[in-house]
Amino acid sequence: MEMPRLNFYYLSPHLLDLLPAKNGEEPTIQFLLEVVDILTNYVKKTFDRSTKVLDFHHPHQLLEGMEGFNLELSDQPESLEQILVDCRDTLKYGVRTGHPRFFNQLSSGLDIIGLAGEWLTSTANTNMFTYEIAPVFVLMEQLTLKKMREMIGWPSGEGDGLFSPGGAISNMYSVMIARYKYFPEVKTKGMSAAPRLVLFTSEHSHYSIKKAGAALGFGTENVILLSTDERGRVIPADLEAKIIDAKQKGYVPLFVNATAGSTVYGAFDPINEIADICEKYNLWLHVDGAWGGGLLMSRKHRHKLSGIERANSVTWNPHKMMGVPLQCSAILVREKGILAGCNSMCAGYLFQPDKQYDVTYDTGDKAIQCGRHVDIFKFWLMWKAKGTIGFEQHIDKCLDLSQYLYNKIKNREGYEMVFDGVPQHTNVCFWYIPPSLRGMPHGDERREKLHRVAPKIKAMMMESGTTMVGYQPQGNKVNFFRMVVSNPAATQSDIDFLIDEIERLGHDL
Amino acid sequence: MEMPRLNFYYLSPHLLDLLPAKNGEEPTIQFLLEVVDILTNYVKKTFDRSTKVLDFHHPHQLLEGMEGFNLELSDQPESLEQILVDCRDTLKYGVRTGHPRFFNQLSSGLDIIGLAGEWLTSTANTNMFTYEIAPVFVLMEQLTLKKMREMIGWPSGEGDGLFSPGGAISNMYSVMIARYKYFPEVKTKGMSAAPRLVLFTSEHSHYSIKKAGAALGFGTENVILLSTDERGRVIPADLEAKIIDAKQKGYVPLFVNATAGSTVYGAFDPINEIADICEKYNLWLHVDGAWGGGLLMSRKHRHKLSGIERANSVTWNPHKMMGVPLQCSAILVREKGILAGCNSMCAGYLFQPDKQYDVTYDTGDKAIQCGRHVDIFKFWLMWKAKGTIGFEQHIDKCLDLSQYLYNKIKNREGYEMVFDGVPQHTNVCFWYIPPSLRGMPHGDERREKLHRVAPKIKAMMMESGTTMVGYQPQGNKVNFFRMVVSNPAATQSDIDFLIDEIERLGHDL
């Protein structure tokens, strides 16, 4: 590393005028307000349908440097003016995930209260490990988790939980605590202290269960995939058959994941029937409600998670269906104390027992993390501002919109649904069939051609920047579009726009 | 869950006037600016030494509700006016981690550029899994990681890496990839496909290595603690002896963690000597530089990490010594491709191979997470604004300050150093001996009394709200203060203040 000595650039007044500099208050506020001006302009434009969703560039284009926007870092500082330009350009070349026509991900939208909450969180810049340095946030987390457990239906909202850095980590927690519950000696002795353990999850479930199996030392071969019906829901008889099969092979079934809202189809596994089997064979039941958990907020739709109160643990990501800014994921556990039992290491430097306050509020040792970002405040603030009924209205509206889309295309020329019937969640999965393929007999040639349609339309969509929607293959089904609605800004006209756009871009393929 | 029907509260104009409401621009900007006003006032006061570091309340006091501040969530929405009050109160009852006299944690300070970066990140509200939805951030991450690898000293900055949700997770990654390197079949077959593997780390190292051992299925008993010298540095001969011992027992040594900047003493393990042993026995060498990695930015201090270029992986948390807002932690890996090999599951719905751009930029499958928070932007922006030399100056200044503290107290009446000699990092560990204990002969009674001194002073400090510094026991050493400096706002006068305050509060104990 070669670096020149301190030189005059660094002495340019701007950066050094900011706090903690003497008399730094005024330049600091001025700088922050200039940033806020950039951000509020971005917010305004994000909601403006005449703005593009994105201004697409290839990686090499951005790496070569757009005019005035150079990603390279250097030894010397830039001026604050350039920093403001960099902020503007970063937003300019990014993707407006809050745009009413951004449908690409399960997380979309830009909630203003949540945004304010994140700005405050960054300003407070603290850490969840102890009450000592995050008193308010630690209590908010406890109260919010209790509310969520009440909604799950655990008696009096009792139990435990944590906010974690995302659904994959929350799901990983569920596997860890299941293992700890049945084989606590694995914590000290490792997996060799347990028999060959197997986990069960749907072939439609999120890949994080498999990732957890790999990471935690089970091995992906011991993550057994369950067959589903044509709607992507686990077939309970298949679960039971595979449990029996595993036992016959001498393996020990440990854990079943039921998905409440699968990633692609939005399918809800039949929790009650799965819970019956888990009880019969004494297995841990986890419900991955990362995507579908939000429906618990809706009196109209919560029946889709019926039986969730029988789960031992639940993943629920408010950053998906509930529109909370990223990241906000909770792992909720019915049994108190087991998270701490599984994870605590009692580090003296953080968790001193001889503090002046009630140290049961020092919850950090329950986590696999040490430092833990404050993910609770934005969610708490949104809940305050909307009330439970505000979330309910948001969810009901999104489900109505997806039903509108379903009704619009189910019999429309040029569309085929990937599965029949009204979607359970906001996922609407469909193929667009360009006119050139409409008369073609079903067979390999048509399959191959159809497989290339969605990627081509998507690429054109991104290049024109008008809207974004996801696609993927699933099992033996070739690439199809997966539409999801979680954005509170979306309306029927945006759904119409999406369909028009697919047809405009795909018509001549 | 019982909820009343939609009622007039929700129809109060305020919340529903915000975007995405029609004509919502003006009320939205107005609301956000009111929030920013609260935040900028908080920022100003944070740097003002006449402001308290905290306004301490016990958990039950906050739970019972302070005037106008009620943490409970309800079905009905609150007014936006109340939301603003809630924001103010959340800050009021929190801890000012950016205050020049907050020394409680390895992460402290409030960097204005970093703060602006976080505000922008929340506004962009996207996710790191694909280039598709985070083009600029994905490239910034790659360029920044390359810069960091260059500073480590890996040829041409080659290698791999990711930003993860904290040092504990980064350390967990290192253990996972070491296992994958030597026993790749564990990914599919689980730990039963490997012999009994052992990990080595210092008794002074961070507890996350043990947590990783527990989580990943090694078992904490297979995390072997290494003895240290009186300064908390691993004794290489002890490592070699323990490797030989493990092999004699039939275990398979896999992984050695060398700490670069231990949590309590700030000790730097002798990396070169440890690397020699790792090479001799063919073990993975990880350097946990979560706390000390920042010193690589300083030409004066980087020699303390000499040998780090021989590591297979490195944890480095810019959110600690470099003053980047939380969270910002990197796991850096010398061998390319191994992160993906270890973690990828190739989920079709996210990582489509048939996109129009170069999909090697879709880095999400390398992570154990699916969604991943954008932690890079604030760091990138700070690097742009300060240049490498700006970080260097910050680090040199903090180390100078801690040497100032060391010089001030090493021979001062009423102080005993926990270890002799100039600290390697900014950690200064010391006992304050109140006058009542100064004449007392060394022995159990004095030990017990001294053990209670730091907690008592700390409690009084928090109640008076004037400053905060950490304490803990370590091994057979009773509670002592651990002073750390990472806050760019701290000056010699703040160090003087801390000492005065300890003496004021502890004099009559």
Image (cartoon, coloured by chain):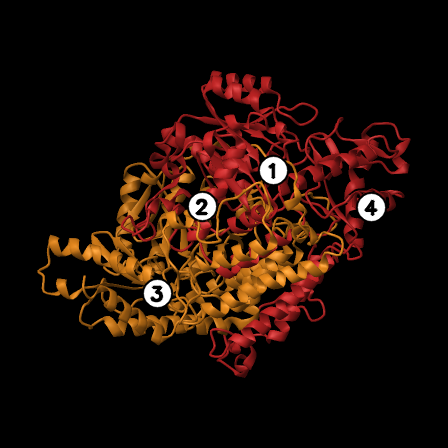
Chain colours: A orange, B red
Q: Which residue is mark 1?
A: B294
A199 shown above or below B80 = above
Q: Earlier in the sequence, mark 3 or mark 2?
A: 2
- What is the chain identity of the residue bearing mark 2? A
Which residue is found at the position 40% from the left and 30% from the top? Answer: B181
Residue B177 drawn at (x, y percent): 43, 34
- What is the chain identity of the residue bearing mark 4? B
Front tag of 1 and 2? 1
Front tag of 1 and 4? 1
Secondary structure beneath dot 2 equals: helix
Q: Amino acid at mark 4?
A: Phe
Whether callout 4 and callout 3 share a subunit is answered no
Q: Earlier in the sequence, mark 1 or mark 4?
A: 1
Q: Which mark is residue B497?
A: 4
Q: Amino acid at mark 1?
A: Gly
Q: Quadrant of residue A501?
A: bottom left
- Disc 3 + disc 2, Cβ < 8 Å: no
